[in-house]
Amino acid sequence: MLQYLNILLDDTSASYCQYEAQKEQRLITLENLKAGVFFSMVENLMVQFVYPEYDLPKEYLQIIENIDHFNIKYTADDADVCIVDNWDFLKANANVPIVVRTTKKDLFQKYQSLKDIITQIKRLNVIVTDIDTFNDDDYKEYKRVLEDLSEQLRRTYINGQKPQLNLLTDRMMLSQMNNCGAGDTNITLAPNGKFYVCPAFYYENESDSIGDLEHGLDIKNKQLYKLDYAPICFHCDAYQCKRCVWLNHKTTLEVNTPSHEQCVVAHLERNASRELLLNIRKHGTFLSEQEIKEIDYLDPFDKRDEWQ
């Protein structure tokens, strides 16, 4: 069931996931912005406005302020989520969740800087933009990085702080899937006045729309975006995995089928979360109702013969 409408205010709006935004400006028209807001009201959807780096005209801001919404921005000012495309995010407001987008190479080389930042913020989401290129050596390095960050989080939690780092703490808190939900719980309105499963589909192929403001939604095979129709994910307990349908489509040509790389990365995070939870509990009661069982695989597809 739809719950959210993401409205890209410009083609250069901040990317908050693995996709790359366009470099040339194309501001959504006032008519499309008004129609998008009206659509969200009729459908009872929460709006998430995704901003470009430049300041919007005053008349746009007036429309935005007429509805309850979340702001996704490149700056922490008046933002509910702050997007960072480089590692210089120490200036960001510590009270605002931060999303840093990074390649695996930069993460492996620069992750040490996260250790100090973890103690200064409430929440940090690290988005690795090239998961589909991971190989066996990358998996080993990613596992090492997670273990190192986990130790920093353990010390931080023991000292009474409870920062959130999506790669390690999300799975500790979850008892069911908490995926992206593109095409199922949320859709995107692009500056051209058309709807898309998510911004990535828009930027990859503008003709790949799922409807428009004039005629409404037309999601083909919309059941495929639901967990019940994703056989691998349905049997998985890496609940923190974003189950990116765009990455699925890009790597397997099926929106409901993840790639091996996405599954392995998610399970490395899951297993590191399990170890972190066990280590924190050595120093006191913490999430006593939560358990993450030990497993002997990194890709649930390898256990398909055991699915009931």
Image (spheres, rainbow, N blue to C red):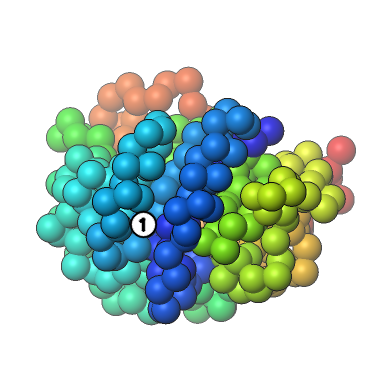
Q: Is residue 209 left or right of residue 145?
A: right
Question: Horizontal placement of 140 versus 179: left or right?
Answer: left
Is 293 in front, or is 184? 184
Quarter where residue 127 is shown: bottom left
Residue 249, image x and y in percent? 71, 66
Q: Is residue 48 left or right of residue 213?
A: left
State the residue at coordinates (55%, 59%): 190
- Residue 289: x and y, percent? 48, 20
Q: Amino acid at mark 1?
A: Tyr
Classify the position of the C terminus by image quarter. Answer: top right
| Residue at (68% x, 33% y) in the render | 1
User: Does any portion of residue 223 appear in the rendered image?
Assistant: yes
Q: Nearer the viewer, residue 78 or 108?
A: 78
Q: Which of these two is toward me, 196 or 185?
A: 196
Location of mark 1 (residue): 51
Indicate whether 118 appears above or below 299.
above
Residue 295 placed where, x, y %?
62, 46
